[in-house]
Amino acid sequence: MIPRYSRPDMVAIWSPQTKFKIWYEIEAHACEAMANIGVIPRENADAVWKAKDVEFDVARIDEIEAVTKHDVIAFLTHLAEHVGSDEARFVHQGMTSSDVLDTCFNIQLVRAADILIADVELLLAALKRRAMEHKDTVRVGRSHGIHAEPTTMGLTFARFYAEMDRNLTRLRTARTEISTGAVSGAVGTFANIDPAIEEHVCAELGLTPEPISTQVIPRDRHAAFFACLGVVASSIENVATEVRHMQRTEVLEGAEFFSAGQKGSSAMPHKKNPVLTENLTGLARTVRMAVIPAMENVTMWHERDIAHSSVERVIGPDATITLDFALHRLTGVIDKMLIFPDNMMDNMNKFPGLVMSQRVLLALTQAGVSREAAYSMVQRNALKVWEFRTDFREELLADKEVCAALSVDGINEKFDMAYHTKHVDTIFARVFKD
């Protein structure tokens, strides 16, 4: 991923140095396990561990690979340069390249998941704080972009919290599912390597042995992992889109923080654009680009092909690095987001009283009016408000048929804003469970 949308901790997971260090640890633990069961001499296993503090020379490995055309062989050749050819002769015994590549890839995905889980936890804290802050800040709810009925800004934050909390569960599940390793040899039969080797390596590296591998770890695990990242990205876009709508000039119920010295447009000095949330919308699309290729990687020829390999070299770093950056950016947006309660009430009253139409409809039916007749009575008055910007309550009070069914007091009672927020505490208790 380009540096503009990258954070160092996630980038480090995908660096060549990190990859080669993990490859080394897999091979060293395998040698140790072989020595434990007497397959190779103990002194050879111990010799491999002498390289534990080596900073592997990426340029040298690339130089060897230019000749071998095989990355794992290039690495093993370079490792032997540090350990000694004779001492390293049992390294990789009975193993196949995918034992190293797949186990390493899953370790990297687990580490990436740990960062993403921490990111979501920070985002949840920000969403909860803003939800509590604006639990009773009334704003109009919208369906199809049109005024519907009153809600609160706190409920808006709370529903995003609940969505991200589900994503936290999904990420933890994805982390568990991807936490497998395989050291089972060519086509996964353990013909040339004892299953105890795999068990030892996985235990040392915090993985679970893959129950049955071929020459590779099954890619349905990876498909589920990247699908999870796609869902998280979509949730980010969901929040970002709401912020973008709130920041529109005609709405202006909320906005991204605009810092001192910030500029909104190269042409129009008055502009304050929602650049961060627009950026998040784009980043979400970038993460989701990984989902379909990951799904397609599930299908392989027989026990192995490498059609998945080039895909994963791209989507592994790009999707995780981008999502890490996006989660961090969204947390900053929520933390600093400006909220404008007065504008919320102004917007509510652009068509005075109109959002109470359902209360009046229900009251009419409860008063004995058929639903069809009640709907017609309410709608004819509501349409006057749409057309002439009059007051909905005043229109109802001037309608003799409505007054006959409900009375003046009955109509007035239906315009109590608190009616719509009376269960906010119940919803909050469900969402936050504390």
Image: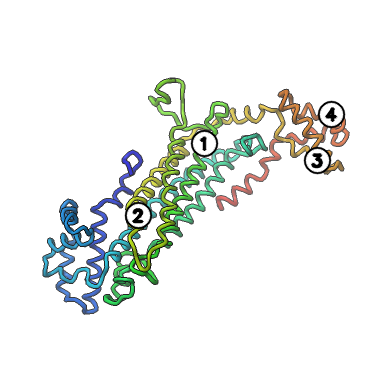
The answer to which of marks 3 and 2 sits earlier in the sequence is 2
Does residue 428 appear in the picture of this structure?
A: yes
Circle 1: element type = helix
Residue at (44, 32) in percent of width and height: 275
Q: Nearer the viewer, mark 3 or mark 2?
A: 2
Of 219 and 421, the residue lying toward us: 219
- Name the disc covering residue 399, or none: 4
- Residue identifier under label 2: 312
- Residue identifier under label 1: 243
Q: Position of residue 62 (x, y in %)?
A: 19, 53
Marks 3 and 1: CB-CB under 8 Å? no
Rate crowding at label 4 as few (under 14), some (14 to 19) or many (20 or more) other CA atoms within 10 Å. Answer: some
Residue at (19, 69) in percent of width and height: 91
Q: What's under tag 1, amino acid-wise?
A: Val
Q: In the displayed orientation, state which residue is furthest to the bottom.
A: 38
The answer to which of marks 4 and 1 sits earlier in the sequence is 1
What is the distance, in whole Å, between disc 3 and disc 2 at their CAs? 60 Å
What is the distance, in whole Å, between disc 3 and disc 4 at their CAs? 15 Å
Circle 4: element type = loop
The answer to which of marks 3 and 4 sits earlier in the sequence is 3
Quadrant location of the N terminus in the rendered image: top left
Marks 1 and 2: CB-CB under 8 Å? no
Q: What's under tag 4, amino acid-wise?
A: Asp
Rate crowding at label 1 as few (under 14), some (14 to 19) or many (20 or more) other CA atoms within 10 Å. Answer: many
Does residue 209 appear in the picture of this structure?
A: no
Task: Classify residue 62 as left or right of residue 255.
Answer: left
